Image (cartoon, rainbow, N blue to C red):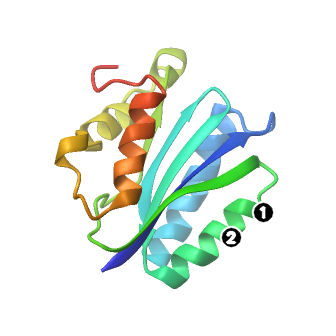
Amino acid sequence: MLDAIVYTSRATEALTDTELELVLLRSRTLNAARGLTGALLKRGDTIVQYLEGEPEALGRTFARIAQSPLHQDVNTVARATGVDRHFTTWHMGFRDFQRHHLRDASTTEWIAAVPAIEDVEPGNAALVRLVELWHELGTSRSA
């Protein structure tokens, strides 16, 4: 069983969509070694990230994120313990990203991986909150 966390932050001006993509490419390698998976949503300067993994690795990774100069106003919005892994690989969802960058594969994969709220395991408050934030940011499954 794993722990999960959802946080929100604001991207600094230095964190363009291209820079975010580079950061995520580097992070995927590190997170795979740490046994972490999750999802990231960015719309404008708003970032929502869900991370799942072993508690110690999750805590260390989140501490690094909170100290990153690419984020401002990092806030934990939900945590869950003893949950099953939902994301087997990393997914990114960008509101308007595919239209602006013509890279729809990761967004399409993300949309397919985001469950409907009624399909989320009720004991995973972090995953429930991720899906709620996905809908609050105005992103639909057909986007």
Q: Residue at x 34, y 24 (%)?
A: 140
Locate residue 90: give its quadrant. Answer: bottom left
Q: Residue at x 81, y 33 (%)?
A: 13
Which amino acid lies under the numbered mark 2 shown in the image of this protein? Answer: Ala
Q: Residue at x 45, y 22 (%)?
A: 98
Which amino acid lies under the numbered mark 1 shown in the image of this protein? Answer: Gln
Q: Residue at x 77, y 58 (%)?
A: 68
Which quadrant does the C terminus fall into?
Answer: top left
Q: Which mark is residue 63?
A: 2
Up-down relation of residue 90 to residue 55 (above or below): above
Query: How packed is label 2: few (under 14 Cα within 10 Å), some, or many (20 or more)?
Result: few
Which quadrant does the N terminus fall into?
Answer: bottom left
Judged from the image, the secondary structure of the residue bearing numbered disc 1 is helix
The Cα atoms of the two marked residues, 1 and 2, are separated by: 6 Å
Given contact means CB atoms under 8 Å apart, are the residues at marks 1 and 2 in contact? yes
Q: Which residue is mark 1?
A: 67
Q: Position of residue 19 (x, y in %)?
A: 69, 40
Up-down relation of residue 40 to residue 36 (above or below): above
